[in-house]
């Protein structure tokens, strides 16, 4: 199943146009850190549903220890509960350090699995973990988490979904294969979602 992911940083996205182009799903950012909320979460979810897309959510993590991870998890759950939306796809814990915040604030990558486990154990919803292929291979013991895996491993011109050199030879539940797909006139991250065997 083809999908993509969005946040308020992408501005207005025409979900009807995305659906017409063959996309079936979208993962929408709901929150970040201990207090941050995505201002477009509710609108994005409602418009995506109106367009006939399946919807999940993600929370961008700013944790350095498990106490922080619990507060991040509580913020994520509150954002979803307050929006009052139905999510057909998992809620993902975005475990990365794209802006370098964690590395500047004492984060030890050896703690990544424990932070992810805190989210999985406390979110109370169908959930998963998002990270790059290198994080899954080097820092996150994803097999022990017992949840969906959203693997970011970008290929400039993928020939088919899930090439054999993904995370330990698999792509997980969902594979983000690019950050530059043209969807509804915007450059967005694009994904494939796989059914469980």
Image (cartoon, helix red, strand yellow):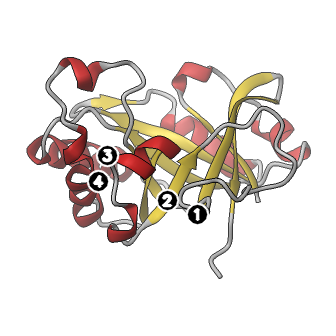
Whichever of callouts 2 and 1 sits on the residue coming sooner in the sequence is 2
Whichever of callouts 3 and 4 sits on the residue coming sooner in the sequence is 3
Instruction: Relative to 114, say whether 35 is above or below.
Output: above
Asked whether disc 2 touches disc 1, contact meaning CB atoms under 8 Å apart, the reply is yes
Name the residue tied to disc 4: 116
Question: What residue is at 21 percent from the left and 17 percent from the top?
Answer: 104
Separation (CA) of disc 2 from disc 4: 11 Å
Label number found at residue 173: 1
Separation (CA) of disc 3 from disc 1: 21 Å
- Which quadrant: the N terminus? bottom right
Separation (CA) of disc 2 from disc 3: 18 Å
Instruction: Relative to 156, say whether 131 is above or below.
Output: below
Residue 106 horizontal/vertical position (percent): 14, 26
Residue 160 horizontal/vertical position (percent): 84, 54
Name the residue tied to disc 3: 76
Instruction: Relative to 26, say whether 125 is above or below.
Output: below
Whichever of callouts 1 and 4 sits on the residue coming sooner in the sequence is 4
Separation (CA) of disc 1 from disc 4: 16 Å
Circle 1: element type = loop
Camera-nearest residue between 11 and 126: 126
Residue 146 horizontal/vertical position (percent): 37, 72
Separation (CA) of disc 2 from disc 1: 5 Å
Whichever of callouts 2 and 4 sits on the residue coming sooner in the sequence is 4
Question: What residue is at 43 percent from the left and 51 percent from the top?
Answer: 136
Asked whether disc 2 touches disc 3, contact meaning CB atoms under 8 Å apart, the reply is no
Seen in the image, is 24 located left or right of residue 130? Answer: right
- Of the residues tagged 2 and 3, which is closer to the observer? 2
Using a 10 Å C-alpha cutoff, classify the residue at mark 3 as few (fewer than 14 neighbours), some (14 to 19) or many (20 or more): many
Name the residue tied to disc 2: 149
Asked whether disc 2 touches disc 4, contact meaning CB atoms under 8 Å apart, the reply is no
């Amino acid at each position: 199943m083809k999908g993509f992911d969005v946040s308020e940083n992408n501005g207005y996205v025409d979900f009807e146009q995305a659906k017409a182009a063959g996309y079936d799903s979208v993962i929408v950012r709901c929150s970040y850190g201990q207090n941050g909320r995505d201002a477009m979460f509710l609108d994005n979810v409602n418009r995506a549903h109106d367009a006939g897309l399946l919807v999940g959510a993600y929370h961008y993590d700013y944790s350095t220890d498990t106490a922080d991870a619990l507060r991040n998890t509580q913020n994520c759950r509150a954002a979803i509960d307050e929006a009052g939306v139905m999510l057909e796809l998992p809620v993902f814990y975005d475990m990365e350090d794209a802006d370098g915040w964690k590395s500047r604030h004492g984060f030890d990558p050896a703690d990544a699995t424990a932070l992810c486990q805190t989210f999985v154990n406390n979110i109370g919803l169908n959930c998963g973990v998002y990270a790059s292929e290198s994080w899954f291979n080097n820092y996150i013991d994803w097999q022990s988490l017992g949840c969906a895996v959203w693997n970011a491993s970008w290929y400039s011109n993928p020939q088919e979904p899930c090439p054999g050199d993904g995370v330990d030879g698999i792509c997980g539940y969902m594979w983000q294969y690019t950050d530059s797909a043209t969807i509804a006139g915007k450059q967005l991250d694009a994904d494939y979602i796989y059914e469980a065997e």
